[in-house]
């Protein structure tokens, strides 16, 4: 009887696990001593406090994401796929969420640091990154009119 009760308790606890949550973010990062903003797109899956996903830069170069989310604090490790198993180009992104914005600092494994900022989006990577493509200035991802104006001027 005890074994049956234990099995039922395990099943109940497992059934109460929180479903994974998906988040999409579009934003920019800055290099030290530079005012040029580079685009960044994050596609996150959050389960409990664990974060996984993928990131894309303005050239659609892909990186895997692993990290944690504690309350409103994100700690993400981006590993560029074109680096294979080498961690020589890994980048740590740390940020604090405030409503639909994350702001924080990124740090390359060699010690270079800079600022980054992102806002939530419903757009996919390619469409969201087009809004940040030079020579157009960063736009709110909800503003399709801005994208149309950029496309006409390009």
Image (cartoon, rainbow, N blue to C red):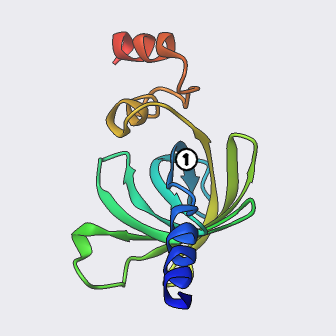
Residue under the point 38% across and 77% down:
89
Residue 107 found in image quarter: bottom right
Residue under the point 49% across and 82% down:
4
- Give the SS element for disc 1: strand
Whole-percent x, y for residue 79 in the image? 37, 72
Residue topped by disc 1: 28
Which residue is at the far bottom?
2
Residue 69 found in image quarter: bottom right
Residue under the point 37% across and 40% down:
125
Whole-percent x, y for residue 65 in the image? 43, 66
Q: Is residue 134 visible?
A: no
Whole-percent x, y for residue 139 in the image? 56, 26
Residue under the point 61% across and 71% down:
113
Q: Nearer the viewer, residue 125 or 60?
A: 125
- Image quadrant containing the C terminus: top left
Q: Nearer the viewer, residue 46 or 110?
A: 46
Q: Nearer the viewer, residue 121 or 8?
A: 8
Residue 96 found in image quarter: bottom right
């Amino acid at each position: 009887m005890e074994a049956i009760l234990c099995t039922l308790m395990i099943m109940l606890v497992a059934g109460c696990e929180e479903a994974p949550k998906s988040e999409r973010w579009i934003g920019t990062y800055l290099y030290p001593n530079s005012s040029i903003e580079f685009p960044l797109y994050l596609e996150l899956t959050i389960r409990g406090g664990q974060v996984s996903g993928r990131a894309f830069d303005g050239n659609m170069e892909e990186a895997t994401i692993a990290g944690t989310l504690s309350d409103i604090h994100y700690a993400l490790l981006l590993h560029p796929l074109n680096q294979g198993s080498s961690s020589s180009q890994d980048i740590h992104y740390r940020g604090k969420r405030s409503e639909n914005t994350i702001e924080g600092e990124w740090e390359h494994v060699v010690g270079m640091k800079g600022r980054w900022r992102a806002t939530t989006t419903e757009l996919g990577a390619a469409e969201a990154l087009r809004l940040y493509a030079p020579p157009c200035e960063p736009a709110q991802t909800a503003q399709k009119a801005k994208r149309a104006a950029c496309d006409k001027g390009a």
